[in-house]
Amino acid sequence: MTTFALPSSYQSVIYLVLTFADGLIFGIAIKKGILSFILMIIGALIGTYIGISLPGVSVSLLLSKVLVFLGYILSKAPSFAVGLPVLFLIGLAIGLWKG
């Protein structure tokens, strides 16, 4: 039978708490960034519809940049995820969900 054992030193506990908190903060930041990007796309669409736009920025340009960025992220994801502790992933998930 396996039992859950707490680390013996306070430093290990602090590292675990900080790892969780770091994941939580990253999750909240990612969620806010995604929301900001969606609002920017909506603003660009409305601006284009009424005839106002930023020079050099269009919806098609933004969407093409997103697709290139997502391709890059997906190519790097396996090597990035190897070193992540479970508590970081739990904090990231909670930050994305509740953030």
Image (tube, helix red, strand yellow):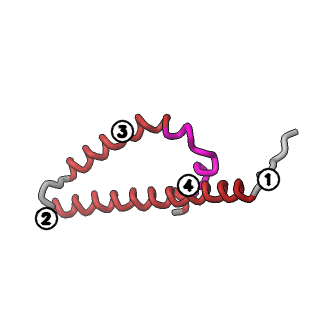
Disc 1 target residue: 8
Inspect the image, locate mark 1, and give the three-letter code of the amino acid beneath it.
Answer: Ser
- In the image, is residue 92 part of the stretch drawn in magenta? yes
How far is mark 3 from mark 1, CA to CA? Answer: 40 Å
Circle 1 SS class = loop
Residue 79: x and y in percent read 49, 35
Q: Earlier in the sequence, mark 2 or mark 1?
A: 1
> Relative to residue 7, is residue 43 drawn left or right?
left
For image coordinates 52% across by 60% down, the residue present is: 25
What range is drawn magenta here? 80-94
Residue 87: x and y in percent read 63, 51
Circle 3 SS class = helix
How far is mark 3 from mark 2, CA to CA? Answer: 31 Å
Q: Earlier in the sequence, mark 3 or mark 1?
A: 1
Inspect the image, locate mark 4, and give the three-letter code of the amino acid beneath it.
Answer: Gly
Disc 3 target residue: 72
How far is mark 2 from mark 4, CA to CA? Answer: 39 Å
Q: How many residues crowd mark 2 within 10 Å: few (<14), some (14–19), many (20+)?
A: few
Disc 2 target residue: 52
> Relative to residue 66, is residue 29 drawn left or right?
right
Quarter the N terminus occupies: top right
Circle 4 SS class = helix
> Relative to residue 4, is residue 75 drawn left or right?
left
Residue 54: x and y in percent read 15, 61
How far is mark 3 from mark 4, CA to CA? Answer: 21 Å
- Marks 3, 2: nearer the viewer: 3
Task: Please determine whether, in this image, residue 54 is positioned above or below residue 69.
Answer: below
Disc 4 target residue: 23
- In the image, is residue 42 part of the stretch drawn in magenta? no
Q: Earlier in the sequence, mark 2 or mark 4?
A: 4
Q: Are marks 2 and 1 in contact (CB under 8 Å)?
A: no
